[in-house]
Image: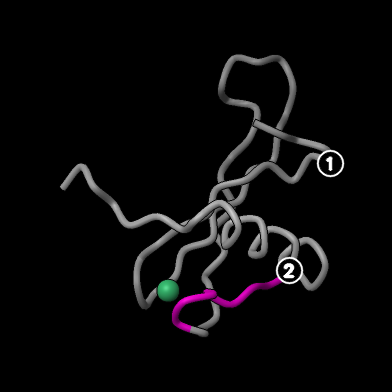
Amino acid sequence: MADAAQFSLAEERAVRETYARDGHADCPRCAVRMQAKALGGGSFGLGYARRREWLLCPGCHRSVLFDLKRGTRN
Ligand SMILES: [Zn+2]
């Protein structure tokens, strides 16, 4: 099961932008509300607390992981 379903980059960006703007986002494929899960910050040995959130679609199980810090880019 190494091949987890993924959003395209464009879909992932749309989810991030929607979530940042509205505080919630719908899956671009299933049109169902994605579940937000907060991941604990500050435990990665980086010396600062970083809030991360993980949005999971209950329909297709695709997920988007992102930092809430502004301007984060990978
Ligand atoms: Zn979905």
Left or right relative to 29: residue 19: right
Give neighbour class at mark 1: few <14, some 14-19, many 20+ (Cα, 10 Å): few
* Residue that lies at the very extreme toward the left in this rendered image: 1
Residue at image coords 23%, 47%: 3
Residue pointed to by mark 1: 70
Locate residue 60 relative to residue 34 in the image: left or right.
left
Q: Position of residue 22 (x, y in %)?
A: 79, 73
Q: Which amino acid type is marked by label 2?
A: Thr
| Image coords of residue 4 (percent x, y) | 28, 51
Badge 2: few (under 14), some or many (20 or more) residues near its Cα, within 10 Å? some
Which span is picked out in magenta? 24-30
Residue at the (75%, 69%) spot, across then down: 23
Disc 2 secondary structure class: helix
Q: Is residue 42 above or below residue 33?
A: above
Answer yes or no: disc 1 within 8 Å of ligand 1: no
- Residue drawn 44% across and 70% down? 57
- Picture residue at 68% right of the left edge, 72% below the top: 24
Q: Secondary structure at mark 1?
A: loop
The image quadrant where one finds the C terminus is top right
Q: Which residue is mark 2?
A: 18
Tell me: 54 left or right of 5. Answer: right
Which of these two is toward me, 10 or 22?
Answer: 10
